[in-house]
Image (spheres, grey):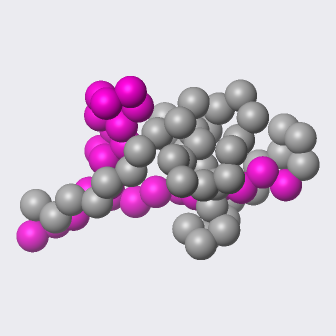
Amino acid sequence: MSAVYTVAKGGVIIARLKALIWVRLTAPGVYLVCDEDEGEGVIVGGEIYHVRGCALLPGKETVVLDYIEE
């Protein structure tokens, strides 16, 4: 059995990933890679997205995450 994260924007899955890279905003325009518990967004395909339910990231589109075991 394997598991993946799905990343959806506007109800459409834009990525299926085995692991997530979490980031947080530390200063205007400065993002640091961090653990999930500190995360405010994720990197997908080189782009930073705000994760629904986390602190807002100015100018970033919002995505919804799901974890699926296959």
Placement of the N terminus among the 4 image quadrants: bottom left
Asked if the stretch drawn in magenta spans residue 70, the answer is no
Q: Residue at x 63, y 61 (%)?
A: 39
Residue at the far front in the pictured view: 53
Q: Quadrant of the C terminus?
A: bottom left
Q: Is residue 26 left or right of residue 54?
A: right
Question: Residue 5 falls in which quadrant of the image?
Answer: bottom left
Residue 27 position in % (x across, y down): 90, 49
Q: Main secondary structure of the magenta part?
A: strand
The answer to whether residue 43 is seen in the rendering is yes
Residue 2 spot, x, y in % from top left? 16, 66
Q: Quadrant of residue 37?
A: bottom right
The span picked out in magenta is 1-26
* Left or right: residue 27 compared with residue 47: right
Q: Is residue 47 visible?
A: no
Q: Which of the two residues, 11 or 43, is positioned nearer the viewer here?
A: 11
Residue at image position (49%, 35%) is 45
Q: Indicate yes or no whether the magenta region holds residue 18.
A: yes
| Residue at screen point 84% across, 38% down | 29
Residue at the limit of the structure toward the right, as seen here:
27
Label tally: 0
- 56 or 38, nearer to the observer: 56
Image quadrant where residue 30 sits? top right
The relative height of residue 55 versus residue 57 in the rendered view (above or below) is below
Residue at 68% across, 45% down? 56
The picture places residue 66, in percent across and down from the top left corner, at 31, 54
Question: Taking 3 as reference, is 49 left or right?
Answer: right
